[in-house]
Amino acid sequence: MMKIMVIGSGGREHAVIKKLKENPEVTEIFALPGNGGMEGDAVCVNIGAKDIPAQVKFALENKIDYAVVTPDDPLVLGAVDELEKAGVPCFGPNKKAAIIEGSKVFSKNLMKKYGIPTAKYEVFSDPEKALEYIKTAPIPTVVKADGLALGKGVIIAETREDAENAVKSIMEEKVFGESGAQIVIEEFLEGPEVSVLSFTDGKTVVPMVSSMDHKRALDGDKGLNTGGMGTVAPNPYYTNEVAKECMEKIFLPTVRAMNEEGRTFKGCLYFGLMITKDGPKVIEYNCRFGDPETQVVLPLLKSDLFTVMKAVTQEKLSEVPVEFSRDSAACVIMASDGYPGKYKTGFEITLDEETKKHVFFAGAKKENGVLKTGGGRVLGVTETAKDLKSALEKAYEDVQKIAFKNAYYRKDIGARALKAEE
């Protein structure tokens, strides 16, 4: 009899909850705060993801046996430290380890110090010096806010003017708030991108199935950057050779480097990689499951998620089998038209019970028993099949069975991956 609490409210959390439910020991799952679309799978509790004192109080009052902290903000703020101090075992890194995502400056310096392949970079805390540097920097260039910015703190500048504007908006206009007090300006890398989530207990690293995200809002990879409009797994660019090189030069060295720094990382370590002509390089680290990568990776996990998570917490990951299916998975995000800019919400969502089995809800709310849109990314439709083409066909068939006013989705999720498979 296990009571579990999952912190967060998006599609990623819904995917984690659905997977945890498969374990017969798990009797109750609470989502803090969750969303209206998750209600059949978890009890939603109106406590915000960043309200750590309230989370601790809830865990103690409800005799929670285990907590899963999924979003970046509570991890960087130290939710795991506070819950563990109160006697609640957790899945997720502590505050000292979560800095690997919480500070781009920290992670870039870590890679430089330990020889982990990444883009060349410079760090600035003075906008004048940053603007001076831009005058001679190779273009295109990448400008990143140091801290968390809802995944939007990265600007790819195609021209010198774009780069100057990026520096000014981040450092002077503070579009990302205090996250932009320091910035990283780094070389623009080229090649296919690969996301690899991994389980690690600080000793063993077990990579999950690779995936490919689709960040841009519009078909053909056009439009603004979003939190992700869809994903496919596995990623065809992530060959066995690439995987081997990543394990030797990136994954294990990163975990060892964190140990050396006295910041042992336990949880899900996300590697955002670029397969360049000089081999794989790290674009970014995340200290948690990616969203929407989780929505394609976890449905392919054959092992029991709760067992794996407990092994991570207890530093016994090497003793537990972690197996993935050889099938393919595809996730199509249905969003509110206008996302990531201005959009309207509050429209009824209609879908049948059969289709619902393949849906992870993100921006949804219940009003008087009616399920309505409540965010930019409303839901993700995920299907698995023997091959990617079939998984995509099934996912897009499901999309046709779901309706809400202002629904928008990309029609070309997986197109690049299919082309690469040829």
Image: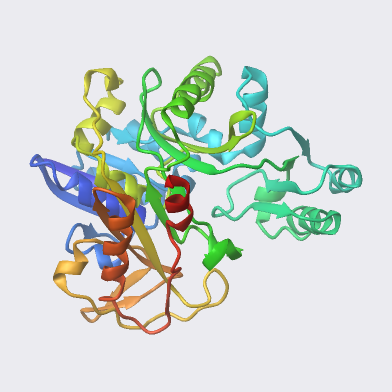
Which residue does the image show at 67% across and 56% down from the upper left?
A: 177
Q: Nearer the viewer, residue 281 or 418?
A: 418
Q: In the image, is 208 to the left or to the right of 152? A: left
Q: Residue at x 23, y 53 (%)?
A: 30
Total number of numbered discs in the rendering: 0
Judged from this view, the residue extending furthest toward the front is: 422
Residue located at (30% from left, 80% from top)? 403
Quarter of the image where one finds residue 130: top right
- In the picture, residue 120 is in which quadrant? top right
Residue 327 located left or right of residue 69: left
Q: Is residue 46 above or below residue 106?
A: below
Q: Position of residue 396 (x, y in %)?
A: 32, 67
Q: Is residue 108 above or below residue 140?
A: above
Question: Residue 418: percent from the left, percent from the top?
Answer: 42, 52
Classify the position of the N terminus by image quarter: top left
Task: From the viewer's side, name the closer residue of 276 and 332.
Answer: 276
Residue located farthest toward the top when viewing the structure as drawn: 260
Residue nearest the observer in this picture, 376 or 39? 376
Residue 62 appears in the rendering: yes
**Dividing the picture into quarters, in which one does residue 25 lie?**
top left
Scheme by which the image is coloured = rainbow
Q: Which residue is painted at 17% across and 63% down in the image?
A: 40
Where is residue 258 drawn, in percent x and y? 52, 22
Res 8 seen here: no
Whole-percent x, y for residue 29 in the image: 19, 50
